[in-house]
Image: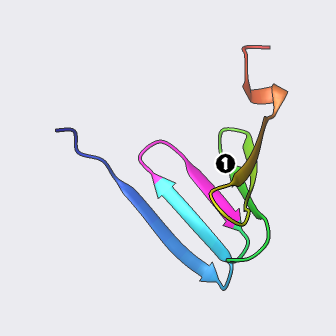
Amino acid sequence: MAVTFRKSIRILPGVRLNRNRRSWSLSLGRGKGPRYTFGSRGRRTMSMNLPGPFGYRRTATSRSRRGGR
């Protein structure tokens, strides 16, 4: 079994700083409504829980960090 490292720190209500071994991310949002996540590797995610067994997620990756260009 691999050993992993993950740490989540609540900065303010609705704001979290998440850290693992290779990167970090910042999550903004509370229980109701959308949650926005910005990662150190250029990934941006907007997610929202919908009533019932549904959920919505949209992910965008910035082009500047994708390839070697």
Image coords of residue 54 (percent x, y): 68, 54
Q: Is residue 43 above or below residue 67?
A: below
Which residue is most to the front? 52
Name the quarter where the C terminus is drawn.
Answer: top right
Magenta: main secondary structure: strand
Image coords of residue 27 (percent x, y): 67, 64
Coloring basis for residues: rainbow
Image coords of residue 5 (percent x, y): 34, 52
Badge 1 amino acid: Gly
Crowd class of label 1 (few under 14; some 14 to 19; many from 20; radius 10 Å) = some
Q: Which residue is drawn at the image coordinates 74% and 28% (left, top)?
A: 65
Q: Which residue is mark 1?
A: 39
What's drawn in magenta, residue-wise? 20-27
| Element at label 1 | strand
* Closest to the observer, 32 or 67: 32
Q: Which residue is drawn at the image coordinates 73% and 39% (left, top)?
A: 42
Residue 15 located within the stretch drawn in magenta:
no
